Amino acid sequence: MKFFVKFTPIVGKNIDAITRFANWDLESGDAMMESMGIKVLAQYFMTEGGGFMVAEAESSSAITAFTTPWTDLMEMEISTVVDREEAQATAKQVVSIVSQMA
């Protein structure tokens, strides 16, 4: 499964979030995510703080376990995402179900 994770500093916690990230060992963090079965596909940061990542994992529990320790400083929004082919297939399925209900 693929997940979109948006992280935004909690009001008044931006400097604390920046400080934690500045001191974060990126290689250890990557190894931790890998050991949890998380593969980061993209990760971008906004210059004013916060950012997002797109990651792949077997379930949402790994994503939740990795992001929860940051929730004292960051608001997290986690959504399951699909590529456009899967989204279109789902849309067709929905249209079919709705047409059967009419």
Image: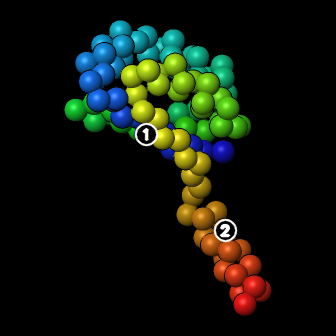
Which amino acid type is marked by label 1? Lys
- Taking 71 as reference, is 8 above or below it? below
**Which element is circle 1 on?**
strand
Q: Quadrant of residue 15?
A: top left
Residue sitting nearer the eye, 39 or 100: 100
Q: Quadrant of residue 22?
A: top left
Q: Which residue is mark 2?
A: 90
Mark 2 or mark 1: which is in front? 1
Q: Residue at x 43, y 10 (%)?
A: 25
Q: Is residue 88 visible?
A: yes
Q: Is residue 54 visible?
A: no
**Location of the N terminus (image quadrant):** top right
Which amino acid type is marked by label 2? Thr
Q: Which mark is residue 82?
A: none
Q: Residue at x 67, y 32 (%)?
A: 61
> Badge 1: few (under 14), some or many (20 or more) residues near its Cα, within 10 Å?
some
Among numbered discs 2 and 1, the one appearing first in the sequence: 1
**Location of the C terminus (image quadrant):** bottom right
Question: Left or right of 47: which side holds 68?
Answer: right
Q: Which residue is mark 1?
A: 6
Question: Left or right of 41: which side holds 17?
Answer: left
Where's residue 24, x and y in %? 40, 12
